[in-house]
Image (cartoon, coloured by chain):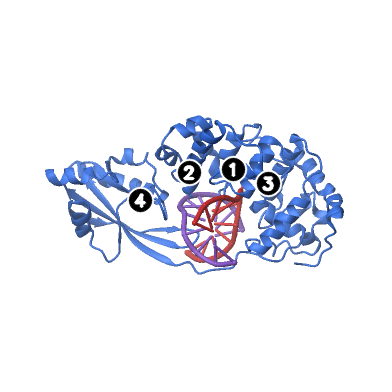
Chain colours: A blue, B purple, C red
Amino acid sequence: MIRQTVGRPKVSVVRSAPFASRLIQWQLVYGRHSLPWQGTRDPYAIWISEIMLQQTQVSTVIPYYERFMAAFPNVASLASVSVEEVLTLWSGLGYYSRGRNLHRAACMLMEQYNGMFPRDVAALQQLPGIGRSTAAAIAAFAFGERCTILDGNVKRILARYFGVNRYPGEKITEERLWHLAEGLLPVGEDHETMTSYTQALMDLGALICVRTQPCCQYCPLQADCNAYQNDLTAILPVPRPRKILPVKEIVHLILLNQGQVLLKKRQASGIWGGLWCFPEITVDQDGIDYCKKNLYLRATKLTELPHLKHTFTHFKLIIRPQLLQSVMHQPVCEESSRKDDCLWLTIEEALQQAIPAPVKKLLLMTQPVLQSCIHE
DNA sequence: AATTCGTGGAA
DNA sequence: TTTCCAAGAAT
């Protein structure tokens, strides 16, 4: 830590008053007030938005949020559908365990709370997909509970404000940030104050205290900000320690038959868990052989499509797509269609399933090819 | 405690 | 192009 004067608890509570009130005053004038999930105290709407916004930018979330709320406007409607239907609307958004947990939590809310939301943070945190920060966001926005969030915005703000010169993702540092955040909460306990304050933290981080080139001229915390006073805003917060991303290479088999493609459901765990994907093999496997042994399909190779690069947080993936024409003999056809983890679909149908982003790209690339195949 | 979960925007 | 990371949680 950079040298700083952190007082005893009583002192820090008193000193925190200006922090919260300045933020709140700033938020009322310069903050965001028209995001789709604002202006409501419906815990369901707030919950959905908070889950979608985990590690995901606002502009990305908005269309997904609108579609999701239109389809599932409340806990009961979400709990009543299959997890498949939830993942279909989640398709392309990433971190698909969020969608699975959302559905599980909706079912738990129906069973344990009669479809209502518990008011306290501890109970909220028991629900799958709701951690400490998301629980605090829901409790603050929906119920006016006096609890603090600690998302990427707040970590960045506090790292600068207090001059925290260690990586915020580090466990010990994160605990420190939680403690600092608790100490900055507004003293009042009314709902409106907690809503404004929590939104203020997010807005300051998103609009002023951004990662690169923060707009310190317009920051209500400028006078007390350690990083600004010491010209450290460019190097705080300390970035994540670099790691070399491993590169994985796989083959996706795009099987074509009578205007349809084959999608295979992935196992529940691992990347793209439970989503529909092309059959996947290693680069040194033979696609035609794989079709024969695992899918009971005779196939002939058509062509190899240009490879697709996809970067995850922890590895890079090179997808080598192979177009295969499958010939389905009658008994073989029955056998392959009997597998409940395989689906023959037109591309239009496939695009409406729970598929990850690269599969969507490949489907769109395949569309013209399939058209020409049909005319043969 | 360190990994494993997606995807796309911004620099 | 590469790098970083965004309203984090679960394991």
Sequence-earlier tag: 1 or 4: 1
- Is disc 1 on the same chain as disc 3? yes
Q: In this view, does A50 lie to the left or right of B3?
A: right
Image position, residue A43 (x, y; %): 61, 35
Q: Which amino acid does label 3 sit on?
A: Met
- Amino acid marked by disc 2: Gly
**Residue A182: horizontal and vertical position, in percent?**
74, 51
Could you tell me how far apart the alpha carbons at marks 3 and 2 are, in whole angstroms? 23 Å
Helix, strand or loop at mark 4: loop
Point out the residue furthest to the front here.
Answer: A112
Mark closest to the chain's N terminus, 3 or 2: 2
Q: Circle 3 sits on which residue? A: A202
Q: Are marks 1 and 4 in contact (CB under 8 Å)?
A: no
What is the distance, in whole Å, between disc 3 and disc 4 at their CAs? Answer: 36 Å
Dot 3 crowding, Cα within 10 Å, few <14, some 14–19, many 20+: many
Residue of label 1: A50
SS under mark 1: helix
In 3D space, how far apart are the residues under numbered discs 1 and 4 (Cα atoms)?
27 Å
Q: Which of marks 3 and 1 is nearer the N terminus?
A: 1
Please tell me whether mark 3 sits on a helix, a strand or a loop: helix
Res A38 visible: yes
Residue appearing at x 43%, y 44% in the figure: A91
Which residue is disc 2 drawn over?
Answer: A99
Disc 1 residue crowd, few under 14, some 14–19, many 20+, Cα 10 Å: many
Whether discs 3 and 4 lie on one chain: the answer is yes
Q: In the rendered structure, which amino acid carries the disc numbered 1? A: Glu
Q: Distance between the residues labelled 4 and 2?
A: 15 Å
Mark 2 secondary-structure assignment: helix
Q: Name the residue under label 4.
A: A266
